[in-house]
Amino acid sequence: MTDRIEGYAAAVFDVASAEGVLDRVEREFFALGKAVESQPELREALTDPRIPADRKQSILDDLLGGRASDVTVALVEFIVRAGRGRDLPAIADALAARVAASRDREVAEVRTAVPLDDETVARLSEALGRATGKQVEVRVVVDPSVVGGVVARVGDTVIDGSVRRRLESLREILQSR
């Protein structure tokens, strides 16, 4: 992670903390970061220097208006105006890691095909904590390519419990016979 990314994440952390909305801002940045990461058209719209600043502002208003806190909106606008829209996913990841570290935890990014309810997230957090030996904060990313099951990443550890991985394992077993 570059110093620039860490610097933006630290600034977002400090502002959100001072405003008393750190948890909300971190969740909103995480969701926005994943949206920018997974949607090339959105990423291009926010980063193309040929697109005027007022058009980018309009895109952000459509995307965040009424759904994100004023603090999140202002910070995202600042980052995009500074020409760092492409860095939003990395800034969001660094912010999530910084927030988790402030609580002596690590971020567990969990990809599933469908949204998870709070009870399932709590059970998953507990199971990932046992599996990794770390206290974790789960961030769920809905990813239809997972098909079924979950794929979790905690730091450098990846736990692939997806249906796709199970089918690949079964195919390998059958082919080796």
Image (cartoon, rainbow, N blue to C red):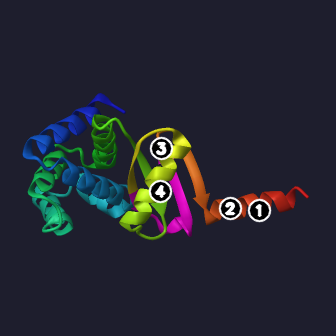
The chief SS type of the magenta part is strand
Tell me the CA gap for discs 2 and 1: 6 Å
Residue 71 appears in the rendering: yes
For residue 26, above or below residue 35: above
Residue 11 image-quadrant placement: top left
Q: x, y percentage for residue 136?
A: 41, 45
Query: Which sits earlier in the primary sequence, circle 2 or circle 3?
Result: 3
Residue 49 appears in the rendering: no
Residue at horizontal 46 percent and vertical 64 percent from the top: 143
Characterize the local packing of mark 2: few (<14), some (14-19) or many (20 or more) Cα atoms within 10 angstroms. Answer: few
Where does label 4 land, which residue? 124
User: What's under tag 2, amino acid-wise?
Assistant: Arg
Q: Secondary structure at mark 2?
A: helix
For residue 142, above or below residue 131: below
Where does label 2 land, which residue? 166
User: What's under tag 1, amino acid-wise?
Assistant: Leu
Residue bounds of the magenta highlight: 140-154
Query: Which sits earlier in the primary sequence, circle 3 or circle 1?
Result: 3
Q: Secondary structure at mark 4?
A: helix
